[in-house]
Image: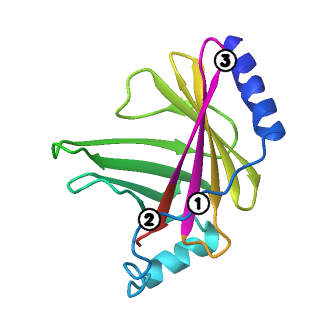
Amino acid sequence: MSNRKSVLRWLVLAWVCPAFACAPGDGDAGEAADETIPAETIEDAASNPRFGVWELESDAEPPVRNVMTYEPWGDGGMKITVAQTNSDGETSEWSYATMFDGVFREVEGQENATTSVEVIDERTNHIFNARNGEVYQVIVNVLSEDGHTINNEYRRTAADGTERVSHAVYRRIQ
């Protein structure tokens, strides 16, 4: 029951606090201008515009990298895989699947972690991350109108009730 109470608390916060658009990154605007999107990605995007490969905008020097891959899963769901490389060149990968139904499902590659995703509107999802049955983070995931950028707003509430908010911008690379 405490998991449900946590989710309800986050839902109230999410509805009371509107989704914030992230500021553009500091990268060179011309960096991705010449990239083309493969035809199969465009076809997949017709069924869900998030399907594809997305890279985190970052000022960190290589080898740091964070890439999300969104692909079809089950009957109308999606599998999300995150591949990361840290500043030491160490890599990690984790993934989860969702049917966008609010049901918590296991996160592969993260111990005692589950995730739930709910669709708010055609461009906005709320992602609830839990560890050991307790929601610790809500992500407001907003797809840009042109379908080439995802803005994530990460909301965490500490035990004392203080809230920490951070943002990340992902650009479509495939």
- 1 and 2 marks in contact (CB < 8 Å): no
Q: Earlier in the sequence, mark 3 or mark 2?
A: 3
Left or right position of 117 against 36: right
Residue at the extreme front: 26
Colour scheme shown: rainbow
Q: Is residue 91 visible?
A: yes
42 or 136, which lies in front? Answer: 136
Q: Which mark is residue 5?
A: none
- 3 and 1 marks in contact (CB < 8 Å): no
Indicate the amino acid at tag 2. Answer: Asp
State the quadrant of the C terminus.
bottom left
125 shown above or below 2: below
Q: CA distance from mark 1 to mark 2?
A: 9 Å
Question: In the image, residue 92 lies at what x, y percent?
Answer: 27, 41
State the quadrant of the N terminus.
top right
Task: Say which of marks 3 and 1 sits in front.
Answer: 1
Main SS of the magenta segment?
A: strand
Where residue 9 sits, quadrant-wise, is top right
Left or right position of 29 against 127: left
Q: Is residue 75 visible?
A: no
Q: Is residue 25 magenta?
A: no
Residue at the spot of label 2: 26
Q: Which mark is residue 3?
A: 3
Which residues fall within the magenta stretch? 149-168
Where residue 17 sits, quadrant-wise, is top right
Q: Residue at x 40, y 79 (%)?
A: 32
Residue at the spot of label 1: 23
Question: In the image, residue 109 lies at what x, y percent?
Answer: 34, 33
Q: Residue at x 38, y 88 (%)?
A: 34
Question: In the image, residue 95 lies at what x, y percent?
Answer: 41, 42
